Each structure stands twice: as structure tokens, then as C-alpha cells.
Amino acid sequence: MSKTKFTKGKWVANGAFVSHEDLGCDAIVSGAGCKEINYKEAEANAFLIATSPDMYYEIEKDISILESQLISSETHGEASRLQDRLICKINLLKKARGEL
């Protein structure tokens, strides 16, 4: 798997702002140039951005679990289902890294 390229550490959403606790930097989620995004949507996007690293690591854990289950699966039907789930999770991480 490729390495993560995002800033590691704890991000916190506060309104439409996202802050990094350790680095002391802030970003505003404005939807600049997009007439359709209002403050409530920018605020929701800020929470999503702040939560994304946690979701990324949870997906990594899921992949490890699925790989273990796939190795130990006994039936072809079960292996096929696990393989489909594993591919889906791997593709999610590739999308998060900008590889898809």
C-alpha cells in the first residue's frame, strides 16, 4: 500500500474552520468559487475533513482484518465475498490518496 500523504495528527472542526491541534494551523472550508455552498455545508465539510484521518485508519484496520479472514476462509463463496469487500476497502484508500 502507498503511504499516506495527508498531515497526520488531530484535526478539529469549529464551524467552517478546521484546525490542527499540534501544528497550530487553521483552514477555512469556504467552497470558494462555488455559489451553491452555504455556511451549513461548509461546516459539514469541515467536520468531514477533521474526521477523515480517523476514517482512513479505520479502513486500514478493516483491510488487515479482511486479509486475515480471507487467508483463513474455507469456502469459495465466503472467500469471494471477503475478496469483494477487501477490494472495495482498498479502492476507498486509493481514492483518499488521490490514486483513483
Image: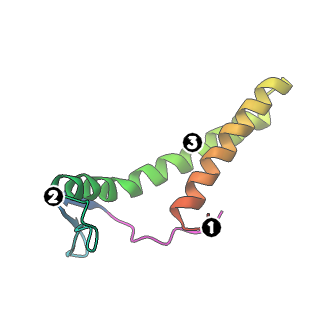
Residue visible at 56% across and 60% down?
95
Q: Percent x, y for residue 98?
A: 55, 68
Residue visible at 43% across and 70% down?
6
Which of the two discs, 2 and 3, sits closer to the camera?
2
* Amino acid type, residue under disc 3 in the picture: Asp
Mark sitting earlier along the chain (3/1): 1
Disc marking residue 62: 3
Distance from label 2 to label 3 (Cα)? 34 Å
State which quadrant residue 71 falls in: top right
State which quadrant residue 63 falls in: top right
Within 10 Å of disc 1 (Cα), the crowding (few <14, some 14-19, many 20+) is few
Relative placement, left or right, of 6 versus 60 is left
What residue sits right under mark 2 in the picture?
Answer: 39
What quarter of the picture does the C terminus occupy?
Answer: bottom right
Q: Percent x, y for residue 78?
A: 76, 25
- Secondary structure of the residue carrying numbered label 2: helix
Q: Which residues are magenta?
A: 1-9
Disc marking residue 2: 1
Within 10 Å of disc 3 (Cα), the crowding (few <14, some 14-19, many 20+) is some
* Amino acid type, residue under disc 1 in the picture: Ser
Q: Is residue 25 visible?
A: yes
